[in-house]
Every structure is written in structure tokens, then in C-alpha cells.
């Protein structure tokens, strides 16, 4: 799978790695005990990692019920290692994130936004929004997309432009008291969201 017109980041140094010291991480405290950690360009060589995951992953479609009908989810998804070999760097990132946040990020999944038509509506994580405290870490590979957050149920939103190896971690009550989305665009180049979560099903 090789989407046409993909523009690789010319500033990407090309050598695979990541900021294991989290030196570029900045926290934003939100209302109701929620917080966001953000690090720009956390992954170096992100263009190479994007291409390897794009090619080696068995991407799947899915459907979900919306009121009285079933609709196709407007993005592709995969779970590692079942849907592909991933990359050795992913395990190093997973271990570093687990150590940093003192919680085992045992579940690794991916979402592929192929173009501007692929999106995700306002939501909180299906399981995490029932927990008092939950963390989700996302590494964005490929072209940047707007990632919006707003208080649960509506209100003023703010945005991050995530791509080129950025790291974003949602924590505290964020999944329960805030919602997030990736809106549709007239034009957007491909992006992969690499997501790390604890095994909440066992809580």
C-alpha cells in the first residue's frame, strides 16, 4: 500500500530513534483533573518508520452501529503483533512510555488515515471513559492532522497539529471529562496513529 502524493518530511534526519529522556515534553493541565503531555518530533526517522508500518501491516476495515444503522468506520486499523511485525523501535518506545508513566502500556494498535475523508468523531476511549484515571499515548507518523479536544458534551475546543513523529499523551480524567476528534479535511496526506494503552479490559 503506497498512497500517491505522500510528501515525506524533508527535515526528518532519517536515523531511527526517539527521545527516551522525554526532554521535549510539555504538559498542559486541563480542567477536572485532566492533562495532556506533548512532545514535537519525539521520533526521529519517523518517515522511515511510517513507510515500514504502512507496507508491513495488514490493515483492516471495521463497522460500528450509529443509532439505527451500521456504518463503515472512516479509517483503517490494526493491532500488533497480530496484524503485522511492527518494528523493533516500537517495543523500545512502549517500554520507555511504561516506565515514564508507571503503567504497563501492553496494548499497541494503529489507525491509518488515508486522506482527508478519513476521520474520527468526538469521543472518549470506550473503556477508559469509565475509569477515574487513564492514560493513552499516541505517536503520529506521516503528514500532520488537526487533533481537537473539548470538554465532555461540548464547549470551546483547542487543537494540536500532530504528525512528523509527535507524541501526545492524554492522562488523568481526560478520557472521561474531555472528548477528542480528528475532523475531515478537503485534502490531507496519509497519517498513522500509533497508540499505546494499558490492558483496561483486565481492570
Image (cartoon, rainbow, N blue to C red):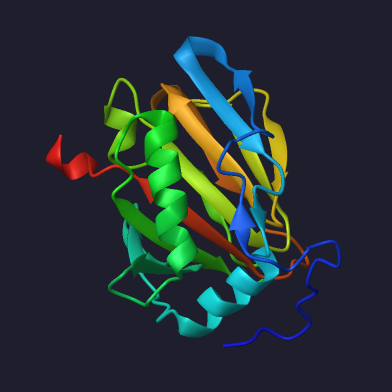
Report the residue at 74% width, 66% height from top: 188
**Which of these two is toward me, 20 or 87?**
20
How far across and down, in percent of the image, does residue 197 sit?
Answer: 35, 45
Q: Is residue 179 left or right of residue 84?
A: right
Quadrant assignment, res 69 = bottom left
Q: Residue at x 30, y 53 (%)?
A: 107
- Does 11 sit above or below residue 18? below
Q: Residue at x 32, y 35 (%)?
A: 128
Q: Is residue 149 left or right of residue 14?
A: left
- Name the outermost residue toward the right: 10
Residue drawn at x 58%, y 36% is 21
What x and y, as percent, mark residue 17?
A: 61, 58
Q: Visible in this render: residue 123?
A: no
Whether residue 51 is visible to the viewer of this picture, yes or no, is yes
Above or below, comparing residue 109 to residue 199 in the picture: below
Residue 175 locus on image (x, y percent): 42, 31
Residue 98 at what x, y percent from top left?
A: 37, 39
In the rendered view, would you say 121 is above or below 187?
above
Q: Nearer the viewer, residue 109 or 71?
A: 109
Amino acid at each position: 500500500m503506497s498512497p500517491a502524493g505522500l510528501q515525506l518530511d524533508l527535515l526528518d534526519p532519517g536515523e531511527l530513534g526517539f527521545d527516551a529522556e522525554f526532554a521535549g515534553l510539555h504538559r498542559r493541565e486541563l480542567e477536572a483533573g485532566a492533562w495532556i503531555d506533548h512532545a514535537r518530533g519525539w521520533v526521529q526517522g519517523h518517515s522511515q518508520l511510517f513507510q515500514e508500518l504502512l507496507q508491513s501491516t495488514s490493515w483492516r476495515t471495521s463497522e460500528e452501529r450509529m443509532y439505527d444503522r451500521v456504518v463503515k468506520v472512516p479509517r483503517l486499523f490494526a493491532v500488533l503483533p497480530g496484524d503485522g511485525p511492527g518494528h523493533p523501535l516500537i517495543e523500545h518506545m512502549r517500554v520507555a512510555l511504561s516506565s515514564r508513566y508507571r503503567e504497563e502500556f501492553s496494548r499497541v494498535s494503529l489507525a491509518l488515515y488515508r486522506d482527508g475523508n478519513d476521520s474520527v468523531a468526538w469521543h472518549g476511549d470506550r473503556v477508559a471513559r469509565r475509569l477515574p484515571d487513564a492514560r493513552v499515548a499516541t505517536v503520529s507518523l506521516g503528514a500532520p492532522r488537526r487533533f481537537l479536544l473539548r470538554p465532555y458534551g461540548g464547549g470551546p475546543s483547542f487543537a494540536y497539529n500532530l504528525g512528523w513523529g509527535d507524541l501526545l499523551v492524554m492522562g488523568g480524567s481526560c478520557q472521561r471529562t474531555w472528548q477528542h476528534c480528528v475532523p475531515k479535511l478537503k485534502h490531507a496526506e496519509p497519517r498513522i496513529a500509533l497508540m499505546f494503552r494499558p490492558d483496561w479490559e483486565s481492570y
